[in-house]
Amino acid sequence: MIKHLSPEELNKRRHLAVQRRIDGATVADAAKQAGLSAPTVIAAYKAFVAGGWAGVDVKPRGRKTGSGRSLDPDSEQTLLQHLFAPSAQACLDSAGLWQADGILDWVQAQLGVALTGRSLTRLLQQWQLSAPELKATLAASPPSTALQRWSKDQLKPLEARLRKQGGTLLWGGLRRIVNPLDGKPCYQLYVHAGRARQFWLLSEQPPLSGLYQAFFERLLAAFDGPVGLVFHGAQLSREPKIQDWLTCHDTSFRLLAMPAQAPSASRKVSTQTTLASRAAPGSRIAHTDRSRTTMALTHLQRLEAESIHIMREVVAEAENPVMLYSIGKDSAVMLHLAMKAFAPSLPPFPLLHVDTRWKFREMYSFRDKMVQDLGMDLLVHTNPEGIEKDVNPFTHGSAIHTDIMKTEGLKQALGKYGFDAAFGGARRDEEKSRAKERIFSFRSAQHRWDPKDQRPELWKLYNSRKHKGESIRVFPLSNWTELDIWQYIYLEGIPIVPLYYSAERPVVERDGALIMVDDERMPLQPGEVPMMRKVRFRTLGCYPLTGAVESDADTLPAIIQEMLLTKTSERQGRVIDHDSAASMEKKKQEGYF
Amino acid sequence: MAHVSDLISTDIEQYLKAHERKGLLRFITCGSVDDGKSTLIGRLLFESKMLFEDQLAAIEADSKKFGTQGDEIDFALLVDGLAAEREQGITIDVAYRFFSTDRRKFIVADTPGHEQYTRNMVTGASTADAAILMVDARKGILIQTRRHSYLMSLIGIRHIVVAINKMDLVDYSEKTYNRIVEEYRTFARQVGIENVTFIPMSAFKGDNITSHSERMPWFHGTTLMGYLETVELDEERLQQGAFRMPVQWVNRPNLDFRGFAGSIASGVVRPGDRIRVQPSGKESTIARIVTHDGDLEQAVAGQSITLTLADEIDISRGDVISGIAAPAETADQFEATIVWMHEEPLLPGRPYLLKIGTRTVTAQVSEIKYQVNVNTLEHTAAKKLELNAIGVCNLTLDRAIAFDPYEVNQDTGGLILIDRMTNSTVGAGMLKFALRRSQNIHMQHVDVDKDARSAAKAQKPCLLWLTGLSGAGKSTIANLVEKKLHARGQHTYLLDGDNVRHGLNRDLGFTDADRVENIRRVAEVARLMVDAGLIVLSAFISPFRSERDMARALVGEGEFLEVFIDTPLNVAEDRDPKGLYKKARRGELKNFTGIDSAYEAPENAEIHIDTTQQTPDQAAEMIVAVLKERGMLVG
């Protein structure tokens, strides 16, 4: 409560408390009368003893803006103008170069603020004055043969010589930045010495040889001993004046041009740019040359882009879309792609889980955690008729269970909420009849699919127009394969249900399949005793209908390895596919997703 | 051979790293029914070890049941999907297959070879970088081979490999191979196909698929797999083009963020780049390239991204963001090649929805310049395009769009046409160029407008559109209405079907295409008259719903009154005032509405007149009453 007092009120109370103490009241009484805590009273009295009545007053909390260690907007503007003013000389250091120390001094002297180095760094970054460190960039860039050769043949000997002579190796170059005052381009000649110290000069025009010379001369003055400069961003070898100057200063100044990104590296960033290694915000690498570079996309990048395109089309054209969420790995990838497609917004649709009540318990807890972590809306629908009649795979068999709980449940949910477009995670490589299904698949008002009446899908043009009552199932993962899904999960670190990883689990063996005893609803046949086996699931559905496989794969690479070496296809674990070759197709015509 | 299979078991992480960097090639296979396409795809899947044992076991079982290859595995069964076509033993739709090798990942579009399925082939080819054209070595170049080649060049596939298959059945004869190559080269020159590679092979036996066949030592070219692994991807060409991004969706999570989401159709973009929004022409600068994983320093064609701009300018879905150095063209009239994909033929003048990039507009084919015979490549005159027909047409849009010629960019030059009634995708089109007149003709602003003209006449203009069968009583009722209005001092005009056909439309017949044009002209004339402030009556059979809707769309909201003169066919035929039904029944009149041409009755007509219940005079009174009620007759 005391925290919310104004300084005036607080001081009044402190004075009162000190007066009471002087009058001989106990700390407790003084505290009570003044409405302060005992420690505050003690502190106020101590302050009185030390400094008299003036010492009792507290200082205003926090720093006044502009008076402490950061700049108020006006001062910031003054500094900005000063830094970018063409004729500004005042905070150049003794050698005639811009650097952080000189600026800090200037700010202290002119604006009366003891700015911290960190605050200044932030400002310089904001104004693009802070150049990326070439050396770090080089270290981060993938090895190319041209750079390696250059490093071995030229850089290393220079380093060795400077070390022997007690000289300094600088890394720097020319970069184009934007003047924040007028938005016009402006050029920065910069170098980095050790410990992230940066020195620079600015020029409104592309620098002429005179400026380079002045820059080099000032560098010579700023450092003891000979200077070696690894330079990037401008071709100086064809400037006779600079070459003359370099010849004159041969013993004290060495310029080493860094090869422009080796041709293979700049033309095909392909091999280096992977999904995982995209530049994070703040770690932008400023390109000194503005030439356009093409970039071969990896197959996963192309698949990702296609899926995102599809999702955005649906959101732009459908009235009430929803994403079916089955908690499996394909759903996980689809949800992840949706987060990407609409960032920084959340995906503008809810998730729908058609719950058969027979999923694994771990699937339910995973589902709830994911939804909470991402902040998505989740709708859960269970066919009420199924609940009423207690439909389950044991007494009703897999066909009826799937039909009532899954197919009917889905139709009910879509109808109930009036969804006109539903994203599903089906892939064309899963099963033969899927290979011919379109990405936008239309369902009549009765949710039937007619494989003879599919709309042609050309280029990226999807026709999502439909009649009232019709709905679309959209499959953004159509062109992904099982390997793509796993690899993407691996690369992007997408969370998946732990059941995919191998662990000791209680199972019984039935009809050649290992069925996990996930809860007490599972009726055990006479003589059946659940055994602990090291198993995992290649696909997740209702637990009584999903066979486990014995496996030791408990990491993603191990799972992928197992998948690639296994000789049976993914859906074999699902009981529903076993009937006949055309079973899935029939189910789909009836409305199964 | 195909996988670095050893790595899978020894160093899975290394394998994943290698796999992750693979590019993606999409290709299409085409050929005649028995050229062995499905067998080839099955073979490619098999060779790249993409088959699981259970699949192979199932195939072996199926081979005995349906197979056409005796005791050997029939690879075709791997890829023939749907039950119906399995029984027929042919593929009928586009199916997509997936496999990968050490160097690339592949998506194959498998399309049928039947003549009636041009649409499927065009669909499959639209996303392909390369095409494999199957030729049966025993049969050589067939009409179908030519047709497929033409389609591939039409759809802009830049790399074609002619797979001369079933070499095992011609004793691996070099002479046969050379003869086919020579024949195809001659033909390819006519069509203008440049990049052709020839490979003799046997998909069934596996010759020249992944390794050079010992049975054809005379062949020194690349194997099929070698070709597929190295052929150039289209994405590189597109990335070198000018920047284009059709805006898909405007992302507004809060008031401080306004992002424009889309897929880059061509070029490269970076923050700081100047852009132009088209067709509005507003300019700005790219501020950020936003993705879920952080901002990008650069994005290229093929990526799906979100852009923010430095300025607050109005941009919505369908606009195109272009690099300022080379912006797209904008126009509303084009010459385009249209592939028709629906049983209902394309009729010039009928309004369709046109989707290009992310924009949907209303469009009409104003003229079919010629139809291309896909077998002979001859140009023939056409008044309509039937299913699978290809025509070069003039397109008129209801507003200007940004575009590039299709051959430059498929994403900003390719379009689909959608039927407004059935919502089906009925056609695909490729823009060639803008018609000059669309760039030179602008709407002229006039000061005296419709409101001023109608105020002077003390009435509100409208269009009374009478529709019904021949002999229903349209002209009779329209005539009575006009007399009653004229007596009240209203300014009217009656456009009568028969009269117009004596003048303005005397060049038109009674085919569906001519009927559509007939109504289009009448609707345009009626629009001018409504603009002049008149109460216009039109009495035309106007049998098609879409043309009546077009007329409705031409005039203002509330100015169109559809009057359904509802007379059952037998009643109209009994009346037969002009003796036309009798003629039609005798077969002397073709395309007579109600007899051998359809009449689509209105579903939501403003006025419904049942002539079996009302006399013409009652009907006319009723129409005048509706006009009064709607405030059309001010005086």
Image (spheres, coloured by chain):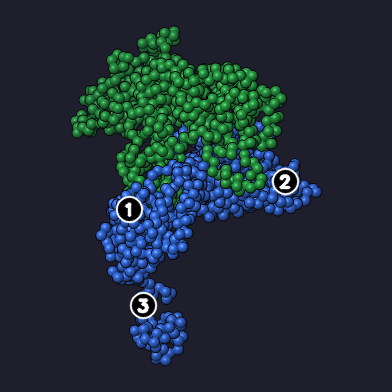
Circle 3 residue: A59
User: Percent position (x, y) of residue A530?
Assistant: 75, 51
What color does chain A have in the rendering? blue
The residue tagged 2 is: A514
Image hue for chain B? green
**Mark 2 secondary-structure assignment:** strand
Choose mark 2 or mark 3, whichever is in front.
3
Answer with the quarter of the image where residue B216 lies.
top right
* Mark 2: amino acid: Leu
Q: CA distance from mark 1 to mark 3?
A: 63 Å
Q: Which residue is mark 1?
A: A244
Q: Measuring 63% from the left and 51% from the top, which residue is drawn there?
A: A555
- Image height of B303 relative to A118, above or below: above
Helix, strand or loop at label 3? It is: loop
User: Can residue B110 be seen by looking at this rendering?
Assistant: no
Q: Nearer the viewer, residue A8 or B573?
A: A8
